[in-house]
Image (cartoon, helix red, strand yellow):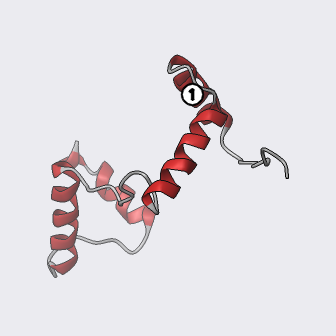
Amino acid sequence: MPRTAVLNVRIEPKVKASVERLFSSLGLTVTDAVNVFLRQSLMRGGFPFEVVRSKPNAITKAAIAEAEQLLRDPNAKSFTNMEDLIADLQSDDKI
């Protein structure tokens, strides 16, 4: 029985270079780090860290609330084409 198996993973070149530098600074190779991840996953019966969708910050939450309010406002200005939107943005009262 072989002592190791090969696992091929496709990642962006910039990500690969960054993790190689990171793990090297910790005295590890990417292979070492992947093995740590996999062993921890087995020990914990899942991901060894919380996997959740990111939560929007206060600015993003405010923008979402404003967009939702505008969608419900029957008096909110709207446009049916880009030309009208651009013309409105470029009008004298906007500059």
Position above or below: 37 against 67: above
Position above or below: 33 against 25: below
Point out residue 36 in the picture as x, y percentages from the top left corner. Answer: 54, 41
> On the image, which quarter does residue 30 sit in?
top right
Q: Residue furthest right?
A: 1
Position above or below: 28 against 38: above
Please tell me how many numbered marks the rendered image carries: 1
Q: Residue furthest front?
A: 1
Image quadrant in which the C terminus is located: top left
> On the image, which quarter does residue 29 sit in?
top right
Position above or below: 85 against 4: below
- List the residue tagged with mark 1: 18
Q: Nearer the viewer, residue 91 or 54?
A: 54
Left or right of 81 on screen, residue 94: left
Left or right of 22 on screen, residue 48: left
Q: Nearer the viewer, residue 95 or 66?
A: 66
- Residue under the image location 38 percent in, 65 percent down: 84
Left or right of 60 on screen, residue 90: right
Secondary-structure class at tag 1: helix
- Residue under the image location 60 percent in, 42 percent down: 34
Q: Nearer the viewer, residue 65 or 14?
A: 14
- Residue under the image location 75 percent in, 49 percent down: 7
Point out residue 15 in the picture as x, y percentages from the top left corner. Answer: 59, 35
Q: Nearer the viewer, residue 7 or 3?
A: 3
Q: Amino acid at mark 1?
A: Ser
Point out residue 85 in the picture as x, y percentages from the top left corner. Answer: 36, 61
